[in-house]
Structures are given as structure tokens and as C-alpha cells.
Image (cartoon, helix red, strand yellow):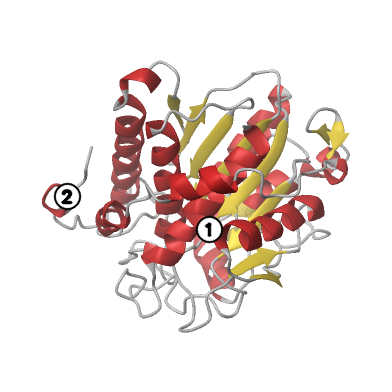
Amino acid sequence: MKLTLLTLLPLLVAASPVARDDGKRLAVFGENEEPVLLTEAELYAEKGKGRNYFDVTNNKEDRKAWRGWKAAGGKKAHEQQYPSPGKYKGQVDQLAAKLDEGRARDFLTQFSAYETRYYKSQTGSESQKWLLDQVNKISEGVPHNRKEVSVRSVSHPWGQDSIIATLPGNKNKPRVILGAHLDSVAGRDPYSRSPGADDDGSGTTTLLEAFRVLVENGIKFKNQVEFHWYAGEEAGLLGSQVVAEEYKRQGVDVKAYLNCDMTGYFPPGDEHVGIVRDNVNKNLADFVAASVTTYLGIPARDTNCGYACSDHASWNTSGYPAAFSFETEFGKHSPAIHTSADTIDQPGFSFKHLLNFSKLAIAFALELAA
């Protein structure tokens, strides 16, 4: 269904907490560091200093014991091999031509109009439910796909759910997964105005458009392809940890995970894609870098983002091959993130750039699952 601004623009709803929790949380700030107990306010203060972390308060597994686990068809993650990209160039170009900038703009205008998408706020829950509705409309809107595409929520105790949409394939083959986070935060008061257009409304939009184009064009896959939108990333990668833990417990094979966190900004005159090189699978990162050059025709530049900087870290520490494509090199990214100025009107924000990542997502799915 075509979205319009008339149907999209809601009144801004004042953010109110579902339930404030001032108790201490258990957090890990580094690979070899022991967990520490801090209040959520203290954690956000550390995040403001650039210290990212896993909130492991609710973890059910010892993550350190997972590192030798064999994923992707019995291979350890670092042994997984990927093709030289380019086989689907013509098809990807045709599909990318169907990406809709107007639709992306309308969606992100609404998504960033919520007062905040903080994971424990009322509007954080409402925005997630609205996103779920958009995903369902795409999956149900094309009759020949209605019985094939599945969409489900992953319930969390804090009130904001994660979302998983699955394009069908052989259930015995390793899955291909693309993920973004649906929450937002600004400053040390997480209930304050936090539009989160770039962080991570952009990645959410990137994946929604890629998902729509693949569904509406009836693309068939040999491997299952999953699109994930995670709750609570800004609070310590909460949603993605839950999902990665569950997949590990169930013995789910994953061929590759691609993270799409911040895809909408680049410095004037310097469009490129950042390829994160720390805390990722090297072979998969090499494949993504080559895919950027092959399919997008813009530079791919190596960059680092540090420990637990986004949801790919949940998959990487769970023994799965994960990669992270970012809007720029770190340090050149949007200066407005985690502030009330993170809107689509921020200078440097580009829907063209955002949809380049949608094209990359389509290429990623076809190369690894078709």
C-alpha cells in the first residue's frame, strides 16, 4: 500500500514510561572485562563518553563458551567462505530501480515523529507496533506471497518487541539475516525528544524498502532470508542478544548476518560506505566490501567501531559470521545522533544514500541465498 503523508503524520505523543526501572544493570564494556553493576543513568553517561556495552542482566548463557561453536553448516564462522560478488548485477539493478524514495521518506517522517523510541517508553512501544503493521501490510499485500512470507514479534519484558520477517527457503540450509534496530535515544534523559532519523530510523527504512521490493517481486530463495528489527539496541544490544541466544540454543545455522545501523548520512562530496573491521567476520566483511564496489559503484572504506557498538556484536560473540556496513567511516558519521536534531532535515542526510544500502541489502540476499 502506498503510504502518504496524510496517512502517516500523527500527533506527537508525549513520551511516558511503561515502567521506570532505576535498579542496577549488569554490563560488560570489553572483551576481557568482568561485568559491572551500574544504574541505567550511569550506563547512559558511559555511552555518552563513547563506551558501548552489552547489558547482560538477563543473559541465560555464558557467551564466552560460545566462541568455538560451529555455525554455518558445521563450519566455524571464520572458516565460512563467500562468493566473488557480481553474479546478480543485472537483476539487482532492476530491483533497485523499484526502490521508492518517496515511500522511504514518508515512512521515516512518521517513524521519527514519535517523541522517542526509547525501549521502555510508551511511544517506543507504539512506534514498534506501527512498524510491525507496515511489515505485515507488505507481507500480506501481494496475494501470491501471502502464504509464504511470515512475520512475527519477539516479545520482551520491557514493552518494546523485536520483529522478524522471513522470506521462505530450504529450512535445512543456513539462513541469511539482515538486521537494524528500531529504538532511539537522545542524551542522558532517554525519555527526552529523540527522533532517531539516522540512528537508526535510516537502517530500519533501508531494510523495509529492500524487504518490500523482494516481496512484491516474488523473489525466490534457496536459503531462508530473514529481516530483523531489534528492540533496545541503545540500552546494551538487548533485543539482538535475545534473538542470537535463542538461535544458538535452537542450533539454527546462519550463513551470514549483515547489520544496517545508520545508513542515511555522508559528508558533502564524500559518499562512501564504511566497512567495519573489528569484532566481525573477516571473510564476510571482505565480501560486503566487494559488494559495495560491484553493486553500488562507490568506495568502501575500512573503519572500526569498537566493542559492542551495534547489533552485529550479538551475532559475532554468539559464534555466527557477522558484518557491519555503515554510512561512512566512523568519525565522519552524522554529528546529530543521540540528539533532538537527528531528523531527516539534518544537513548531509540523504535518501539516495539510504537506498544505496537497500540495494546492497538486496544484493546481499541474492548473492548468498538465491
Q: Amino acid at mark 1?
A: Asp
Give the x, y percent position of residue 14.
21, 58
State if disc 2 and disc 1 touch (CB < 8 Å).
no
Crowdedness near tag 1: few (<14), some (14–19) or many (≥20) residues, C-alpha within 10 Å = many
In this rendered view, identify the residue nearer to me: 292 or 111.
Answer: 292
Give the x, y percent position of residue 260.
54, 54
Q: Is residue 2 above or below residue 326?
A: above
Q: Residue at x 58, y 48 (%)?
A: 89
Q: Residue at x 54, y 46 (%)?
A: 90
Q: Is residue 285 above or below residue 150?
A: below
Quadrant that contains the N terminus: top left
Q: Is residue 148 above or below residue 192?
A: above
Q: Earlier in the sequence, mark 1 or mark 2?
A: 2
Quadrant that contains the C terminus: top right
To which residue does mark 1 refer? 261
Horizontal relation, residue 139 to residue 276: left or right: left
Give the x, y percent position of residue 334.
47, 76
Q: Residue at x 33, y 43 (%)?
A: 125
To which residue does mark 2 refer? 4
